[in-house]
Image (spheres, rainbow, N blue to C red):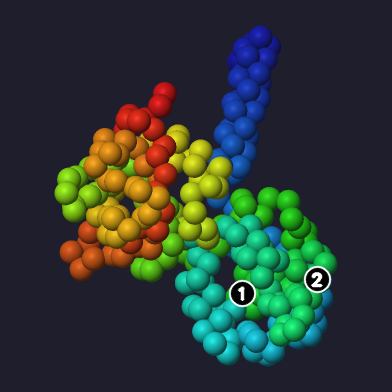
């Protein structure tokens, strides 16, 4: 028979193992990416948003969100425009520009809660599931918009940012050791979060041929930046041979060398 002391050892060891496993599971769950499939809005919120959408948005985007000028808010039209981006970008776009200003007048003033209700309705019409809590402005940048089966490669023609090593000569320049393309909504390089991400970005496996690099402006001369780490923004072009090109719209130096900081 097992002695009382051994029983205590087994009990303590089992309890300790249970704590470790619980902590590991919680850590794994925390590290999972939160997406629009995680139940980020409430059903009540979407119901309110349906009424607000009909009053404020349907004239331009259609009664069924089908769109009237390639501006659909449901299905592929919506997903291809916003996937691989976060809800914060969508919220910023909507609050800064929707609805547009009326001729001879300014933009209608809409309270933030109503914007959130409308977004919730849009999410519900894209079959994103409702959850127990309403969508709020907290943590919008941490909610990714993606298809149910997970992230897909950024589509052709998307405005993206990359960071890597400037390589080449003459009229042929490439960014090497770069990250996978990441969607951006701004064509300038003043966003601190993007710059900081580029600054700390480890060497990647991607290479991008740079097009229009001679037309960036501000006296930019590619040869003066050879061997430097650069943040590059532009539209993504996936070539037939699987290589990638960036039609450059903006460039910013990140570091004097391409070495990843420790």
Please name the residue that numbered disc 2 is placed on.
Answer: 110
Q: Is mark 1 on a helix, strand or loop?
A: loop
Residue in view at x 61 percent, y 74 percent: 127
At label 1, counting other C-alpha atoms closer than 10 Å, the crowd grade (few under 14, some 14-19, many 20 or more) is: some
At label 2, counting other C-alpha atoms closer than 10 Å, the crowd grade (few under 14, some 14-19, many 20 or more) is: few
Please name the residue that numbered disc 1 is placed on.
Answer: 127
Vertical comparison of 33 with 130: above or below: above
User: Residue 4's quadrant in the figure?
Assistant: top right
Q: How far apart are marks 1 and 2 (CA)?
A: 25 Å
Q: Please state the horizontal and vertical placement of residue 1, each as a whole percent of the image.
A: 60, 15
Q: Please state the horizontal and vertical placement of residue 223, each as a whole percent of the image.
A: 24, 42
Residue 47 seen: no
Q: Is mark 2 on a helix, strand or loop?
A: loop
In this rendering, would 208 be left or right of 55?
left
Residue in view at x 51 percent, y 78 percent: 77
Vertical comparison of 36 with 49: above or below: above
Query: 60 or 7, which lies in front?
Result: 60
Marks 1 and 2 close (CB-CB < 8 Å): no
- Among the two numbered marks 1 and 2 on one chain, the one whose residue lies closer to the N terminus: 2
Q: Please state the horizontal and vertical placement of residue 213, each as a whole percent of the image.
A: 30, 55
User: Residue 153's quadrant in the figure?
Assistant: bottom left
Residue in view at x 59 percent, y 44 percent: 29
Vertical comparison of 246 with 25: above or below: below
Vertical comparison of 84 with 4: above or below: below
Quarter of the picture holding the C terminus: top left
Residue 29 seen: yes
Q: Please state the horizontal and vertical placement of residue 30, each as a whole percent of the image.
A: 61, 42
Residue in view at x 30 percent, y 39 percent: 225
User: Which numbered tag is attached to residue 160?
Assistant: none
Count of all numbered marks drawn on residues in the image: 2
Query: 2 or 246, which lies in front?
Result: 246
In this rendering, would 24 be left or right of 129?
left
């Amino acid at each position: 028979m097992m002695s009382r002391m051994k029983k205590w050892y087994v009990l303590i060891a089992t309890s300790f193992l249970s704590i470790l496993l619980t902590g590991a599971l919680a850590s794994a769950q925390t590290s999972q990416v939160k997406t629009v499939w995680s139940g980020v809005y409430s059903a009540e919120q979407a119901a309110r948003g349906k009424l607000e959408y009909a009053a404020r948005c349907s004239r331009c985007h259609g009664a069924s969100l089908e769109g009237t000028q390639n501006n659909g808010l449901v299905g592929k039209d919506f997903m291809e425009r916003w996937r691989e981006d976060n809800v914060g970008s969508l919220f910023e776009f909507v609050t800064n520009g929707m609805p547009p200003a009326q001729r001879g007048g300014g933009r209608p003033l809409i309270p933030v809660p109503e914007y959130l209700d409308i977004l919730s309705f849009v999410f519900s019409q894209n079959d994103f599931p409702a959850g127990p809590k309403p969508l709020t402005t907290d943590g919008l940048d941490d909610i990714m918009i993606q298809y149910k089966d997970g992230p897909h490669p950024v589509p052709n023609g998307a405005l993206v940012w990359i960071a890597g090593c400037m390589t080449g000569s003459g009229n042929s320049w490439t960014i090497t050791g770069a990250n996978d393309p990441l969607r951006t909504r701004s064509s300038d390089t003043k966003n601190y979060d993007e710059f900081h991400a580029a600054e700390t970005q480890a060497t990647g496996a991607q290479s991008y041929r740079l097009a229009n690099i001679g037309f960036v402006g501000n006296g930019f001369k590619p040869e003066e930046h050879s061997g430097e780490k650069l943040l590059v923004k532009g539209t993504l072009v996936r070539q037939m041979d699987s290589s990638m090109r960036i039609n450059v719209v903006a460039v910013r130096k990140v570091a004097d060398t391409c070495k990843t900081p420790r």
